[in-house]
Every structure is written in structure tokens, then in C-alpha cells.
Image: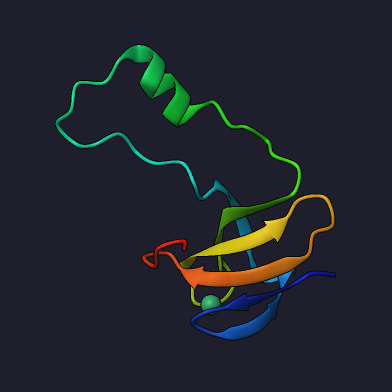
Amino acid sequence: MLYINCPHCGMRSQNEFSYGGDASVKRPELGKEVSDQEWNNFVYNRKSLRGKHWELWQHLFGCRQWIKVERDTATHEIFSTLKANEEIS
Ligand SMILES: [Zn+2]
């Protein structure tokens, strides 16, 4: 079983969390003209990387906050977590 260190609550079982997708996807800037292809990429297209990358998770059965989790998709090892508004370094 995986354990995720929620920045708000501390170490909790993965059963309390819901996966929310790739945290590296950036929403197109507000008011900027966006092509259909750019919007399509933002909404639908993901790289499905193998290895270490940042994901969004929601602590659904806890504080209900969205957090960023650095996880290896091959080994499921979790390296670090951040609050949703914290920048990935
Ligand atoms: Zn929490």
C-alpha cells in the first residue's frame, strides 16, 4: 500500500486520495488567442511518462485539498509532496 505525505495533514494511506492527473500541464493564458490544437493538447493529450514526474492528487477523504506529488510511475515510489499553490523546483 502507498502512503502519501499530505502537506496539510501528514502521512496518510493512498486510499484517502484521488488521482487528478499530470501536474506539469499548464492552462493556456487567459485572454490569449488559442488554436484548436493547443486547446486540444491542454484538455486531452498527455504523455503518459514512465518514471519520475509530478502528479495532482486530491486528499478526498481528509482535508479535501489538491496537492502535487512527485512519484515514479514504474516503481510507485513517492519522493516529495507540495501544496497545490507551491511551485515545482
Ligand atoms: Zn490532507
Q: State the residue at coordinates (40%, 63%).
A: 87
When the figure is inspected, residue 54 is found, relative to residue 8, above or below; the finding is above
Between residues 14 and 78, which one lies in front from this camera angle? 78
Number of numbered discs visible in the structure rendering? 0
Q: Position of residue 41 (x, y in %)?
A: 46, 24
In which quadrant is the N terminus drawn?
bottom right
When the figure is inspected, residue 52 is found, relative to residue 69, above or below; the finding is above
Q: Name the residue at the bottom extreme.
A: 10
When the figure is inspected, residue 36 is found, relative to residue 25, above or below; the finding is above
Between residues 43 and 38, which one lies in front from this camera angle? 38
Q: Name the residue at the left extreme.
A: 31
Q: State the residue at coordinates (52%, 26%).
A: 44
Q: Position of residue 71 (x, y in %)?
A: 69, 59
Q: State the residue at coordinates (51%, 50%).
A: 23
Left or right: residue 5 compared with residue 3:
left
Left or right: residue 55 compared with residue 77:
left
Instruction: Classify residue 30 by image quadrant.
Output: top left
Between residues 32 and 8, which one lies in front from this camera angle? 32
Left or right: residue 29 compared with residue 43:
left
Q: Position of residue 13 (x, y in %)?
A: 73, 75
Instruction: Classify residue 61 by image quadrant.
Output: bottom right
Q: Position of residue 36 (x, y in %)?
A: 35, 13
Q: Name the residue at the top extreme.
A: 36
Q: State the residue at coordinates (62%, 62%).
A: 70
